[in-house]
Image: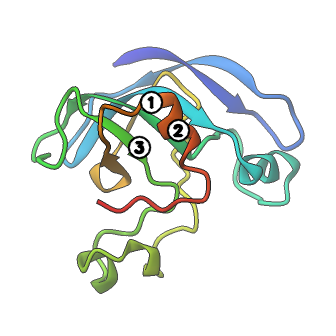
């Protein structure tokens, strides 16, 4: 287990608080990503004010970018050191649409990833990350996610 800081919304209409949390090592089909940048968008604000009623406490931030630190067993799509962006609207990775590479048509997935990126590191499923060119810095990758679906 790793200890790190996370920005957490404890309840609706409350200020974010920074708390220490623990993180397990990545399991099968999971990756550990060191977060370099995370955008804040209107949907984050909608969670805070209750317009988008997600359960709290919650780590916000679905527009993240970072570097893969470790991969779990069976992961071949990315490796340690790869720069990645996190998909804000991942598919289920099982339905016919997802299997054809069209996760934006998936009816089984949530409309937004609940795995927030407002923390130092996160473990997430491989289908929620896409490798990006290292020539772009992570801050721009995070900011450029606004309104963009990531396709690999």
| Residue at position x 16%, y 49% in the image | 77
**In whole angstroms, how far apart are the C-alphas of marks 1 and 3?**
8 Å
Crowd around label 3: few <14 · some 14–19 · many ≥20 (10 Å): many
Residue that label 3 marks: 85
Q: Are marks 1 and 2 in contact (CB under 8 Å)?
A: yes
Please identify, in this view, whether the residue under mark 1 or under mark 3 is nearer the observer: 1
Along the horizontal axis of the image, is 50 left or right of 93?
Answer: right
Q: Residue furthest front?
A: 135
Along the horizontal axis of the image, is 118 left or right of 49?
Answer: left
Q: Does residue 55 appear in the picture of this structure?
A: yes
- 124 lies above or below 54: above
Residue that label 2 marks: 142
Q: Are marks 3 and 2 in contact (CB under 8 Å)?
A: yes
**In whole angstroms, how far apart are the C-alphas of marks 1 and 2?**
6 Å
Residue that label 1 marks: 138
Residue 43 location, quadrant: bottom right
Crowd around label 2: few <14 · some 14–19 · many ≥20 (10 Å): many
Q: Position of residue 60 (x, y in %)?
A: 64, 40
| Residue at position x 37%, y 16% in the image | 2
Dot 1: element: helix
Task: Please tell me which of labels 3 and 2 falls first in the chain.
Answer: 3
Dot 3: element: strand
Specify the label residue 20 is tagged with.
none
Along the horizontal axis of the image, is 74 left or right of 61?
Answer: left
**In whole angstroms, how far apart are the C-alphas of marks 3 and 2?**
7 Å
Q: Position of residue 129 (x, y in %)?
A: 35, 48
| Residue at position x 77%, y 60% in the image | 52
| Labels in figure, total | 3
């Amino acid at each position: 287990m790793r200890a790190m800081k996370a920005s957490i919304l404890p309840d609706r209409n409350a200020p974010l608080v920074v708390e220490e949390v623990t993180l397990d090592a990545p399991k099968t089909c999971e990756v550990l990503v060191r977060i370099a940048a995370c955008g804040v968008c209107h949907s984050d604000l909608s969670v805070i004010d209750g317009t988008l009623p997600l359960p709290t406490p919650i780590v916000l931030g679905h527009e993240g970018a970072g570097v893969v630190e470790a991969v779990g067993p069976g992961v071949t799509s990315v490796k340690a050191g790869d720069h990645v962006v996190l998909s804000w609207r991942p598919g289920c990775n099982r339905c016919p649409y997802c299997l054809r590479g069209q996760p934006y048509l998936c009816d089984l997935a949530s409309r937004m990833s609940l795995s927030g990126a407002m923390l130092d590191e996160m473990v997430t499923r491989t289908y929620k990350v896409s490798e990006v060119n290292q020539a772009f810095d992570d801050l721009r990758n995070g900011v450029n996610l606004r309104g963009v679906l990531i396709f690999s």
